[in-house]
Image: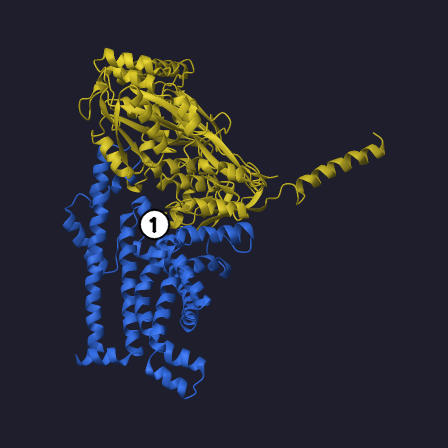
């Protein structure tokens, strides 16, 4: 090689090294302010079930598996692999060279400690119930863990992405105690904790040694701004860069502001009308399958999606979310056909219709009043006179629901507890003895139990397809739609809302 | 004087007791906190266990009695969500609320007293009419609307002040003006009517006849006497101001006791709601007491009348 070529190569190598180490390219910079309506109660991820807390925790801590933001499938994170050894044993290979923010190494001991901490009844972790499938966790070597389950547990990959189940540093937690840890969190995540002024703000700063590489933004501030109008004013005046939960009527104002845009995407929460087919809260015409089918034909769900929700919803033919495991695209919803509905009602002995309660509740359903009124309108057209009963208090609604007193039709919604699997919605609504089950049968119990204990995903899919065809045929629900999350983002940022409602500001970059 | 204050203290005690009773029972009849605390999928056994842990399965009267005895020791219980002492949470946020209400009061009085005096002096003139129209408009304006309008103009349009939050003195301006504008109209009208009443008195005429300068007549002789009803009403106004703070703190994301109470109501964190309501009631009672005492200094007849009566 000629001498000049050697220099050229050296110069290129030098240049490349220079680019990598230079202050401009890879160094985190700037500050992003995120507006949230409420704060969390604790920074300890194992000690709450709050969405805002999960969002904040995800910046400081890591989970064993993460979720692919495009496919929503579980992917490797702190655990590089999760493999089945036998139906009740799983082996986890852990990522090497990961450190907590205090310098403590992340090892198999950290995983065992985190599992044991959540499972310890004295810890009183509110997420304990999600992990009682685990019988024991054993350390094989520094980077290998074996989990033994009581029964075959097909949802293990799903549950290991669970936002609250973050890996915590054993030495730090033991030395400082739970109360200190709850206010001064230490994790392995992309951001290290700086300050938390409860009810006001949380400040975190980029972890430049993060195992996935330093994030692009130096500082993230999560500000608590309860009033939506103030949040939007802050966004438009440049005081806030990202805000969660934009009301649909503000979308155009933000879109035309020139400083921010809207990022909306489908989420796991589905809305449906549940009918009391069992007569659990008292005998009604809903015990007749023809009446339930008539109601399915009477409601024009597509029109509700277009006119009431501005198209920001996705139809769910059987009830389960298309993003969740178990969804069968071959299943079609009942066609909107008021004439057929009237005929079915006549066949069932109600040629002049009947009166029924429609329960709605405040909180999770977007534009609940308008959607409720639309449903009432459709039902009245086929002769069903609806008595609306709205619960302003969610606690009272749930108490009535669980207490077998929610008669008639209920406009319910379900967020799957962030588990992208049909088990998370069907078991609790259709298995006998469950608090929200108003339609039950022995065969449904059998399918649900079998699906819950089957690890083979092909077989599980078949079970759920069979189950879904059955509940659509029996018309226990009027499956309606999956909702959207609507966020607003400053034009300075590359950031998109996620379907699992976890705000990944740590993955945002500057434009 | 001492008897008067003791008498007022005794009254205040009953007011606080009444407020605690109403707050407690209202909170316990409107909903069930247990179901809000547990995840939707919780079993009935979980519900029963948590009720037992929180003592919510006991009779209401017994629960109230233990709330009262604990409250007397300064223990309002623990937040259902953060497990922090409700009293500590309230104390932590008290400086922010006091800062805002005092600033609001200063702004309110700063607007109301000069305008009230001018209005009385220029009675019937255009200035008086403009002030009266302004006062009526101010009273009719919803506080949250005014707050949002101020944000839109000064933060969004001109970008000269921050839209929300607490930190620098700049952050205090918009919420203090909002709260001040809430207080000003009534105080202005009181000042105006008080001044009108005083300005027709003989001693004012005498002072003017003696050649005392008009500024001294107005601010030394007239305003001091017109101030008596204003100070009395300020005690009551302080309660209104705290009520206004509930809205102002929420609109401006101001981290005070009032926004803490609003959040606690939304999440049904009843120990915090109880603590905040009883505590704010205590502050209002105390403000009224101070106003009563201040009036006795402005008007010796009240002090002496009570002492001998």
- How many numbered discs, if any? 1
Q: Quadrant of residue A507?
A: top right
The colour assigned to chain A within the rendered structure: yellow
In the image, B137: left or right of B80? right
A317 over A227 or under it: above or below: above
Q: Can you give x and y, in whole percent of width and height, for residue B220 in the image?
A: 39, 80
Q: Which residue is mark 1?
A: B262
In the image, A476: left or right of A20? left
Hey, which residue is sitting farthest bottom in the picture?
Answer: B210
The residue shown at (44%, 81%) is B214
Quadrant of the rendering where the N terminus of chain A is positioned: top right
Asked if residue A453 shows in the view, the reply is: no
Quadrant of the rendering where the C terminus of chain A is positioned: top right
In the image, B2: left or right of B155? left
Q: Can you give x and y, in whole percent of width and height, for residue B246 in the image?
A: 36, 54
B196 over A52 or under it: above or below: below
- In front of the other: A428 or B29: B29
Q: Which chain has been coloured blue in this picture? A: B
């Amino acid at each position: 090689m000629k001498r000049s070529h050697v220099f050229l190569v050296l110069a290129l190598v030098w240049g490349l090294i220079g680019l990598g180490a230079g202050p401009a390219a890879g160094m985190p910079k700037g500050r992003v302010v995120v507006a949230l309506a409420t704060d969390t109660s604790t920074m300890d991820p194992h000690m709450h079930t709050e969405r805002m807390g999960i969002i904040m925790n995800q910046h400081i801590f890591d989970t064993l598996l993460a979720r692919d933001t495009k496919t929503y499938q579980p992917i490797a994170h702190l655990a590089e692999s999760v493999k089945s050894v036998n139906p009740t044993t799983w082996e986890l290979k852990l990522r090497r060279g990961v450190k907590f923010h205090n310098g403590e190494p992340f090892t198999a001991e950290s995983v065992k400690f985190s599992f044991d901490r959540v499972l310890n009844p004295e810890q009183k972790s509110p997420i304990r119930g999600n992990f009682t499938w685990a019988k024991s966790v054993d350390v094989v070597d520094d980077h290998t863990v074996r989990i033994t389950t009581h029964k075959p547990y097909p949802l293990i990959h799903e549950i290991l992405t669970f936002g609250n189940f973050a890996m915590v540093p054993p030495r730090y937690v033991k030395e400082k105690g739970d109360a200190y840890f709850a206010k001064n969190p230490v994790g392995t995540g992309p951001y290290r904790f700086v300050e938390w002024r409860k009810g006001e703000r949380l400040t975190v700063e980029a972890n430049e040694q993060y195992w996935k590489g330093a994030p692009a933004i130096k500082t993230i501030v999560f500000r608590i701004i309860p009033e939506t109008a103030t949040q939007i004013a802050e966004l438009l005046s440049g005081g806030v860069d990202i805000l969660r939960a934009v009301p649909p009527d503000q979308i155009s104002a933000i879109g035309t502001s020139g400083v921010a845009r809207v990022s909306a995407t489908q989420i796991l929460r589905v809305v449906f009308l549940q009918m009391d087919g069992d007569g659990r809260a008292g005998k009604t015409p809903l015990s007749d399958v023809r009446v339930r089918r008539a109601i399915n034909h009477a409601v024009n769900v597509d029109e509700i999606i277009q006119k009431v929700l501005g198209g920001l919803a996705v139809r769910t033919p059987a009830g389960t979310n298309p993003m969740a495991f178990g969804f069968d695209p071959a299943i079609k919803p009942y066609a909107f056909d008021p004439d057929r509905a009237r005929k079915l009602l006549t066949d069932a002995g109600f040629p002049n219709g009947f009166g029924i309660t429609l329960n709605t509740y405040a909180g999770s359903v977007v534009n609940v009043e308008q959607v409720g009124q639309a449903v009432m309108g459709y039902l009245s057209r086929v002769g069903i006179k609806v008595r609306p009963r709205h619960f302003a208090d969610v606690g009272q609604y749930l108490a009535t629901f669980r207490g077998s007193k929610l008669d008639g039709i209920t406009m319910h919604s379900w967020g799957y507890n962030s588990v992208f699997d049909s088990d998370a919605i069907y078991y609790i609504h259709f298995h006998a003895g469950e608090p929200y089950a108003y339609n039950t049968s022995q065969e449904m119990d059998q399918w649900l139990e079998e699906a819950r204990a089957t690890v083979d995903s092909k077989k599980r899919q078949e079970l759920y397809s069979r189950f879904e065809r059955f509940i659509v045929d029996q018309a226990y629900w009027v499956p309606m739609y999956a909702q959207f999350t609507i966020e607003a983002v400053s034009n300075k940022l590359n950031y998109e809302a996620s379907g699992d409602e976890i705000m990944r500001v740590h993955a945002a970059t500057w434009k | 004087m001492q008897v008067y204050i003791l008498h007022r203290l005794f009254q205040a005690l009953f007011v606080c007791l009444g407020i605690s009773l109403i707050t407690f029972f209202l909170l316990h009849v409107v909903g069930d906190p247990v179901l809000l605390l547990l995840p939707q999928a919780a079993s009935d056994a979980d519900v029963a266990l948590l009720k037992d842990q929180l003592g919510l399965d006991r009779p209401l009267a017994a629960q109230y009695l233990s709330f009262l005895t604990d409250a007397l020791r300064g223990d309002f219980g623990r937040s259902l969500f953060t497990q922090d002492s409700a009293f500590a949470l309230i104390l932590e946020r008290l400086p922010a609320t006091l800062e805002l209400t005092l600033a609001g009061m200063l702004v309110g009085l700063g607007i109301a007293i000069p305008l009230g005096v001018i209005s009385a002096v220029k009675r019937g003139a255009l200035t008086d009419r403009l002030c009266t129209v302004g006062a009526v408009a101010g009273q009719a304006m919803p506080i949250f609307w005014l707050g949002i309008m101020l944000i839109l103009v000064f933060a969004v349009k001109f970008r000269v002040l921050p839209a929300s939050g607490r930190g620098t003195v700049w952050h205090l301006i918009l919420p203090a003006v909002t709260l001040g504008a809430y207080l000003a109209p009534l105080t202005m009208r009181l000042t105006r009517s008080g001044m009108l009443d005083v300005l027709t008195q003989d001693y004012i005429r005498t002072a003017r006849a003696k050649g005392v300068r008009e500024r001294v007549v107005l601010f030394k002789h007239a305003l001091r006497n017109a101030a008596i009803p204003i100070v009395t009403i300020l005690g009551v106004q302080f309660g209104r101001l705290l009520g206004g703070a509930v809205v102002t703190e929420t609109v401006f994301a101001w981290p005070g006791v009032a926004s803490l109470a609003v959040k606690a109501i939304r999440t049904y964190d009843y120990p915090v709601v109880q603590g905040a309501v009883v505590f704010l009631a205590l502050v209002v009672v105390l403000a009224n007491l101070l106003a009563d005492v201040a009036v006795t200094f402005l008007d010796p007849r009240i002090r002496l009348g009570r002492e001998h009566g």
